[in-house]
Amino acid sequence: MSPHPLIVHINKHVHLTEAQVATVLSHFQLQTFAKKEHLIQEGNICKNLFFVSKGCLRLYFMNEKGQEQTIQFALETWWMTDLMAFEKSGESGFSIQALEKVEVMAITNESLEKLLCEVPQLERYFRKVYQRAYSASLLRVKYLYTMSKDIFYEHFASLYPEFVQRIPQKVLASFLGFSPEYLSELRKKKTVEKK
Amino acid sequence: MSPHPLIVHINKHVHLTEAQVATVLSHFQLQTFAKKEHLIQEGNICKNLFFVSKGCLRLYFMNEKGQEQTIQFALETWWMTDLMAFEKSGESGFSIQALEKVEVMAITNESLEKLLCEVPQLERYFRKVYQRAYSASLLRVKYLYTMSKDIFYEHFASLYPEFVQRIPQKVLASFLGFSPEYLSELRKKKTVEKK
């Protein structure tokens, strides 16, 4: 049997013994969600941190105009939660929704703390996960301040070409701060330029 | 002799032996900078990660209008660098400048990797540092998308009242996306409301 994607991902950064693999897996719960189903609803207690084994998630909040504002996506091997709410078992400031049929490994904060004591090598793994997430977010803030929307789209599409095809146009437009119509125009323009 | 602020901060999260404290300190270099001096210049190789022992730093970049856009501050016990450039020893996409006379502990990426092998407990410490930084940045992105500037200022001033007094108004205005004049008006208004 091939190892679970979570174990494959951890093993890229730290080596786990077979016993440790079993310990890790024992703390997680496999959960599946249908397309459009919610993993977390804004305002509810944020109980879980999710590792995406299959499919794609988005993180969004309701803005003051009552529109859903997507600010993050998670593909296979990415982690997602409202981290601040998760740590405090507080109310989530975001919703997390499945964009496709999704399979995740879910862990509670209590289980994670236990697991980090039992398998301290995971500190290194999560240090790397958060370090990468934080360094990307610094760049993200820079883009939010400075980049024109067209350039942000180009940048995003060149980094994640497959992804841009996978997610609904409406959701991608919200993430980029476009109207869906504008995004559609932009994509047509880019396709013509490529020919 | 009282322990260095870096050791005090690490000891809040993990326990170090005396020998480990010595190892930690041996990997860092104490550096001091005068007010307005640069620790990193945008476009130069990003060699160091900084822990602020005394004073205050800002991280900024030059936007397309040729204006300095501040996107982050670091007070005592905060860490600062262009993390992505630091990891790759690449060109920094940001400048880091001292807002006051500053004392930092600087470490290169190579030294940090060595140190993490020699004192593996630090993985936990840095996991916590990055986790906190990442969870704060998620909230930051939400604010950038949604909050009115006045509310962002209020929020920021209530979280860091002492800090708002400490930093130059011009720099704070840039961070908040205000003109310095608007910020001055807003502060007068808030002072009047409090009376």
Image (cartoon, coloured by chain):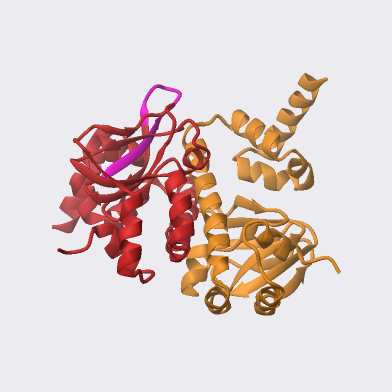
Chain colours: A orange, B red
Q: Which residues are magenta?
A: B56-68
Is A152 on the left-hand or right-hand side of A90?
A: right
Residue B119: where, in percent of width, then height? Answer: 43, 62
Is B110 on the left-hand or right-hand side of B192?
A: right
Residue visible at 18% across and 45% down?
Answer: B188
Q: Is residue B67 magenta?
A: yes
In the picture, the quarter occupied by the N terminus of chain A is bottom right
When asked about the image quadrant of residue A108, the answer is bottom right
* A44 versus B174 height, above or below: below
When asked about the image quadrant of residue B31, the answer is top left
Q: Tell me if I can see residue A93 in this picture.
A: no
Q: Nearer the viewer, residue B70 or B195?
A: B70
Residue A84: where, in percent of width, then height? Answer: 48, 64
Residue visible at 48% across and 70% down?
Answer: A87
Q: Nearer the viewer, residue B172 or A49?
A: A49
Q: Tell me if I can see residue B183 in this picture.
A: yes
Residue A62: where, in percent of width, then height? Answer: 56, 57
Residue B61: where, in percent of width, then height? Answer: 40, 31
Q: Give the farthest residue toward the front.
A: B19
In the picture, the quarter occupied by the C terminus of chain A is top right
Q: Is residue A80 magenta?
A: no
